[in-house]
Amino acid sequence: MNPRVVITGLGVVSPIGIGIEQFWSAALEGRSGVRRIPPFEGLPLEAYRSQVAAQVRDFDPRRWLDATQAERIDRYAQFALVATREALDDAGLRLEREKAHRVGVMVGAGMGGMLIGEQEFTKLYQGLRPNRVHPNFIPMITLNSASGIIAIAHGAKGPNLTISTACSSSAHAIGQALACIRSGQADVMITAGADASVTPLAFAGFCSLRALSTAFNEAPERASRPFDRHRDGFVMGEGAGVLILESLPHALARKARIYAEVAGYAATSEAYHMVVPREDGAEVAVTMQLALRDAGVAPAQVDYINAHATSTPIGDPVEVTAIRRVFKRRADRMLVNATKSLIGHSLGAAGAMGAIVCALSLQTGQVHPSLNYDDPDPACALDGISSKVQERPLEVALMNAFGFGSNNAAVVFKQAPARRRGRRRRSR
Amino acid sequence: MAFDSDIGTQIRTALAQYLRREPSAIRPSDSLRDDLGLDSLAMIELLFRIEETFDLEIPNEDLLKLNMVGDVTGYIEGRLGAPRPAAAAPMPAPRPVPAARSTPAAPAKKAAKRPVARKSGSRRA
């Protein structure tokens, strides 16, 4: 019998707060992390079509990491490491007391070490001195640098993997961590999502793809507006979210506080198009149905959906169409929100952010507002979306994450088993 | 590379190369999406090449106006301040497409990898 898997710790580095308390408090207040970007060095901001992003501000890695360690890792890995430290503390998990090979690391990252990549590339072509490329360039840019450094920092010797599926990376990481624990490979999986690619080239790339919002450069906090009629593209974000996934027996044995259960997961490909979803939502519907089946949950039992909802003209209606296909009349009775309305689209970290929100919502019965939901678009309207906080006891939550590369993920979370349900202080 | 053909022909040529068709097969009334089968990414790639050819930037909000081949021609002419051809004038006979690539940017192998764009479920992002 496969063990059930639960979430026992959370950690976050986000545009609306570093640390879960700050993050959750800001989320419930509907605070936006989107600002006008400071210009990239040497490049006029006016040259970019989109000039807003949700960046992590006032992040000095040396506050949490020693200087040498901080210098040897890209920003995305710094985020992941800082959030991991919080999550492990939050879980009350001391790895020196654990069997090291039973604790693994699963990281989802879409872009990885973009900043160091662009900096060294620029230096190389400006200076034409290949021998001046930094020796740390390769260790920093390799996409598994975050999962490696997390394991090294904490002595986690279990399965150590990095999943890269663009915008659904950390949703897939959660699913694969779930599989590791269910299959008996690990008791604990430090599960992270991290990306930090608001960088000159990566940002320009998304601008050229015409994927980003450009109509709100003068009003940044209004740019990310999922489901709203005036949405015009997503807002790039960055950050890291970490969840400690643990087998239920292991969590109970050490009397851990449990936020929620990770009950089910599905990963599928639309096999359709690298960046455009199938308009009829049929494939997304399948992903959700498979996740529900894996969780042993019927659509009628779902209370809350943390939507992928990036604020793109095409994507939001596809998701809502799919939700209506799966849930039918219940579609308008569930609570639904869009975390990206607050923190933008953190690419590889988005799934982890959504999962953290699901865990906190299940624990507190509070669902954060969907910011800028001012003028609902009938093509993607659901009664359960609101620009205000909503409160309701929740038993089952579903999170969606859809990635470039035509791939989709859905994760189902359930209320924690009553025995170990801990209460986080409600923040309002 | 210097051109001596009119804007409409340049655009048709760019489209023809991108779609691997004869320029004469592309009409101003052709819908980029429904007749020529361009999905949203293909549209963006095509417009990128056109931006490079004419050295201008097409803001996101203008993309919505560009549905037919003629819309693109009219838009570029408007941006460049060129007089529009008479509405009733027949399309000029296509000039021979130069042997060398006449538009810069997007490498040919990128177009080669892309299958003929699907007609269903595609809409510009």
Image (cartoon, coloured by chain):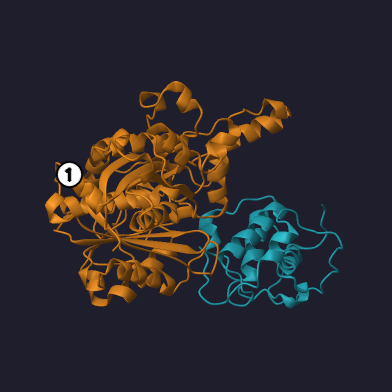
Residue A147: x and y, percent? 45, 41
Residue at 32% across, 68% down = A294
Residue at horizontal 50 percent and vertical 39 percent from the top = A145
The kind of secondary structure element at disc 1 is loop
**In-front residue for pair A157/A32:** A157
Vertical side of A342 occupied by B40: above or below: below
Which residue shows up at 55% across the image and 44% down it? A202
Shade of chain B as shown in the rendered figure: cyan
Q: Chain of mark 1?
A: A
List x then y, in percent, for residue A16: 31, 40
Q: Work out whether A368 lies above or below A295.
A: above
Q: Position of residue A12 (x, y in %)?
A: 32, 40
Residue A183 image-quadrant placement: bottom left
Q: How many marks?
A: 1
Q: Identify the image quadrant of residue B34.
A: bottom right
Quarter of the image with the N terminus of chain A in it: bottom left
In the image, A68: left or right of B72?
A: left
Q: Which residue corresponds to mark 1?
A: A255
Position of the C terminus of chain A, as image quadrant, is top left
Give the vertical position of A383 relative to A90 (above or below). Answer: below
Specify the chain shown as orange.
A
Q: Position of residue B75 (x, y in %)?
A: 62, 61
Horizontally, is A7 left or right of A410 in the view? left
Q: Dot 1 surroundings within 10 Å: few (below 14), some, or many (20 or more)? A: few
Residue A41: name its quadrant.
top right
Q: Nearer the viewer, residue A279 or A252?
A: A252
Residue extending furthest toward the top: A67
